[in-house]
Image (cartoon, rainbow, N blue to C red):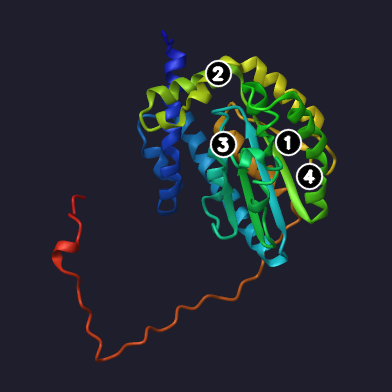
Amino acid sequence: MELNEEQIRKIQNDILDGYDEEWEMEYEDRTADSINKISTFSKEEKDSRKKYFQELFRLQGELVKLQDWIVHTRKKVVILFEGRDAAGKGGAIKRITQRLNPRVCRVTALPAPNDRERTQWYFQRYVPHLPAAGEMVLFDRSWYNRAGVERVMGFCNDEEYEEFFRTVPEFEKMLVRSKIHLIKYWFSITDEEQEMRFIARIKDPLKQWKLSPMDLESRKRWEDYTKAKEIMINRTHIPEAPWWVVKAVDKKRARLNCIDHLLKQFDYMEVERPPVLLPERIRNETYTRIRPPKELYIPEIY
């Protein structure tokens, strides 16, 4: 496939975006002005990236407060992330969970059901992953697989498909009645943007693992997925658990907008913590540190 200059630039930016997580992880030890030292970006791009990081860390600070409040108030939270392949769900989830305690906030991404699970009540394999008090669970794809990939790829029949739509509103109402705060996000991208992200994955050896045969097949069936998505939202958008659509063509804006919206779903407040004091280390005059043999140490290449 012959790529024009604009497409090549988009792919380059997409590859760079994949490395941004490392920037975010290291940014705590840097100043915002350090981004200006990157010579490959124009001034406008540097300013945009600087603003993105500043907003991301501010929002992540609020997520930490939300996490503490969830633990303190013993709330139960479930967040569903749905969307086409390469829509940016995983990137948003990473930024949400990046600074949080994995014992409080965990991600569930279930594989395709096995032979036994296919004979169970459809929602059964999701139930064990629901939160207890003081927990938040993010589903990277969810029970809505039946309305999407299973429908489009023929993994369920018409009867199972209709039974899903009869059951899912009651299932979600039941979750809400049991005091689970349920939030559902759909990440929306264009046909052209998905194509460019798939090409970027093909070009980037660090991302090729993300492309499965199912992903490639989904590319061919864009219109079928569109119809399935429209039916899904129309039939499962209920007052107790409405759908929220995230415009995700711009990944960074999508992440910030999603986190900002998520925070606004809770009337949380900062939980006061007692001051943390580092205790004095107990020293024993008879203690002698025994170092491991030299051959146990890995080579210091760097």
* Residue 160 x, y percent position in the rendering: 74, 30
Three-letter amino acid code at the position of disc 4? Glu
Q: Nearer the viewer, mark 2 or mark 1?
A: 2
Q: Secondary structure at mark 3?
A: loop
Q: Nearer the viewer, mark 4 or mark 1?
A: 4
CB under 8 Å between callouts 3 and 4?
A: no
Mark 2 or 3, nearer chain start: 3
Q: Quadrant of the N terminus?
A: top left
- Give the CA distance from mark 4 to mark 2: 30 Å
- Give the CA distance from mark 3 to mark 1: 25 Å
Q: Quadrant of residue 161?
A: top right
Three-letter amino acid code at the position of disc 2? Arg
Three-letter amino acid code at the position of disc 3? Ala
Residue sitting at the far right: 239
Q: Secondary structure at mark 2?
A: helix
Residue for badge 4: 172
Q: Secondary structure at mark 4?
A: helix
Say which mark, if any, is on residue 112. Answer: 3
Say which mark, if any, is on residue 219. Answer: 2
Residue that appears at 67% across and 45% down: 79
Residue for badge 1: 244
Left or right relative to 53: residue 230? right
Q: Quadrant of residue 291?
A: bottom left
Q: Nearer the viewer, mark 3 or mark 1?
A: 3
